[in-house]
Amino acid sequence: DGGITQSPKYLFRKEGQNVTLSCEQNLNHDAMYWYRQDPGQGLRLIYYSQIVNDFQKGDIAEGYSVSREKKESFPLTVTSAQKNPTAFYLCASSVGNQPQHFGDGTRLSIL
Amino acid sequence: QQPVQSPQAVILREGEDAVINCSSSKALYSVHWYRQKHGEAPVFLMILLKGGEQKGHDKISASFNEKKQQSSLYLTASQLSYSGTYFCGTEMIEGGSQGNLIFGKGTKLSVKP
């Protein structure tokens, strides 16, 4: 079955540590997105990529980094510069004007 | 730029109807509606494109008023399974942001037996 896989489902970060969230899709979608979701805030765009080897900052990119070396993969690194990383992170993909398909999310917490 | 959703929350009895609104201050190319259950991924409901169209499936329908840059989601004869948080995602015409969505803060819908 085609879909988007995010891993891990739960992740804990220590002070000063970088952590990487995985997002893989086998839908052959060109565009991929990372969102952060906090209670009562909706989904806020962190980074997006419309094509391999290219990506753009979203509204809240500070403290995060991404790469898009393969069409199927769009990992997100939460760096130590992100002082409040506790949130639910959602990855999505789309093609053309079709709707975005979301992964099941990764819940990141601070130890 | 974030669209404004109203109401923030609504409680219904099974079989009752509800309307959720999504308003933008910017000219929109499309409006996307999603429903999210707690701790799960948002699930796509429908897209409405500029041109003022209406869409629907089963007992959920939506409209897009291009003049007002407002979309409304209509849930009729609500079922327990309709419970969740509803988000609208707006795609603006300007700014070269085609394909990118800006989401509202969501409307929490609770359907009681």
Image (spheres, coloured by chain):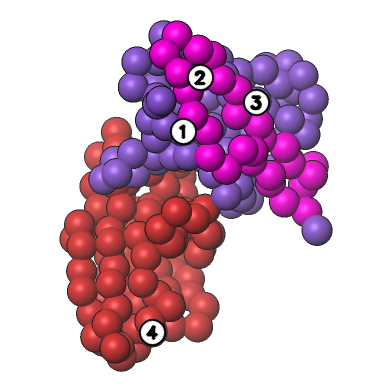
Chain colours: A purple, B red
* CA distance for labels 3 and 4: 38 Å
Of the residues shown, which amino acid type is indicated by label 3? Pro
Which residue is the site of mark 4?
B79
Nearer to me, A20 or B12: A20
Q: How far apart are marks 4 and 2 (CA)?
A: 39 Å
Give the foreground label among 3 and 4.
3
Q: What residue type is labelled 2?
A: Val
Residue beneath the point at 53% across and 33% down? A11
Alpha carbons under labels 2 and 3: distance apart: 10 Å
The span from disc 2 to disc 1 (Cα, nearest Å) is 10 Å
Query: How far apart are the alpha carbons under marks 3 and 1?
Result: 14 Å
Q: Residue A78 carries which label?
A: 2
Discs 2 and 3 share one subunit = yes
Q: Mark 3 points at which residue?
A: A75
Provide the secondary structure element on which disc 3 rests: loop
- Find out whether the residues at labels 3 and 1 contact each other: C-beta distance under 8 Å: no
Describe the element under mark 4 as helix, strand or loop.
loop
| Residue A108 - label | 1
Q: Is residue B17 above or below residue A57?
A: below
Q: Which amino acid does label 1 sit on?
A: Leu
Q: How far apart are marks 4 and 1 (CA)?
A: 33 Å
Q: Position of residue A37 (x, y in %)?
A: 39, 39
Q: Is residue B75 left or right of residue A9?
A: left
Which residue appears at 45% of the width and 54% of the height? B39
| B24 inside magenta stretch | no
- Write the start and end of the magenta stretch as one range: A2-29
Instruction: For residue B93, say whether it is visible.
Output: no
Q: Mark 2 lies on which chain?
A: A
- Residue found at x 56% / y 20%: A19
Chain of the residue on which disc 3 is drawn: A
Give residue A48's quadrant in the image: top right
Q: Does the magenta stretch include residue A16?
A: yes
